[in-house]
Image (tube, grey):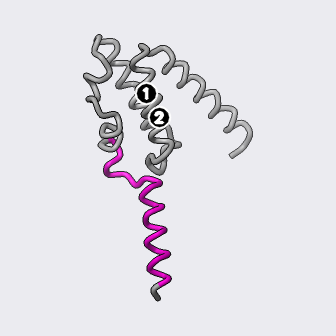
């Protein structure tokens, strides 16, 4: 990754976060919780930006129609996140596999 790619990525991230800040306060709070959740245990490949951008698009549409954020996603933010990535490998999955692989090697 060259310096130009890094600059472009940073520019895109700032534009993305400006869109987040333009959301109603309840949407912004929930979006940041989702983002934090995905950064901790999120899917491998989160860095392509499509998941978070898709959520942001979804939130912008919900806000435009006057719906509350919890009307869109339900009361359990973690369950909403888990459902989004249920068929995708996560860093937690990779960690569990590495532990299982290490314990399997120890028994050989």
Q: Which residue is mark 1?
A: 31
Left or right relative to 33: residue 4? right
Quarter of the image for residue 53 reads top left
Question: What residue lies at 35% left-to-right and 39% top-to-bottom?
Answer: 78
Q: Nearer the viewer, residue 9 or 32?
A: 32
Give the x, y percent position of residue 27.
40, 20
- In the picture shown, does residue 77 fall above or below 44? above
User: Outermost residue, right direction?
Assistant: 3
Dominant secondary structure (helix, strand or loop) of the stretch shown in magenta: helix
Question: What residue lies at 40% left-to-right and 31% top-to-bottom?
Answer: 54
Q: Residues within 10 Å of mark 1 (few under 14, many from 20)?
A: many
Q: Nearer the viewer, residue 48 or 30?
A: 30
Give the x, y percent position of residue 46.
48, 44
Q: Which residue is mark 2?
A: 35
| Total residue callouts | 2
Residue 78 inside the magenta-drawn segment: no
Give the x, y percent position of residue 85.
35, 46
Q: Are marks 2 and 1 in contact (CB under 8 Å)?
A: yes
Question: What residue lies at 48% left-to-right and 48% top-to-bottom?
Answer: 45
Label drawn at residue 23: none
Give the x, y percent position of residue 1.
68, 46
**Disc 2, SS:** helix
**Disc 1, SS:** helix
Using the numbered discs, state the Cα–Cα distance from disc 2 to disc 1 in whole angstroms. 6 Å
Q: Nearer the viewer, residue 30 or 90?
A: 30
Q: Residues within 10 Å of mark 2 (few under 14, many from 20)?
A: some
Residue 90 inside the magenta-drawn segment: yes
Per the rendered image, the range of residues in magenta is 84-106
Left or right relative to 41: residue 8? right
User: Outermost residue, bottom direction?
Assistant: 108
């Amino acid at each position: 990754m060259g310096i130009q790619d890094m600059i472009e990525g940073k520019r895109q991230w700032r534009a993305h976060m400006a869109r987040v800040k333009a959301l109603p306060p309840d949407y912004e709070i929930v979006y940041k919780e989702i983002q934090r959740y995905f950064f901790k245990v999120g899917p491998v490949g989160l860095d392509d930006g499509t998941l978070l951008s898709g959520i942001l698009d979804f939130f912008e549409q919900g806000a435009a129609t006057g719906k509350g954020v919890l009307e869109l996603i339900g009361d359990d933010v973690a369950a909403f996140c888990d459902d989004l990535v249920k068929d995708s490998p996560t860093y937690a999955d990779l960690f569990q596999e590495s532990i299982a692989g290490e314990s399997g090697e120890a028994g050989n």
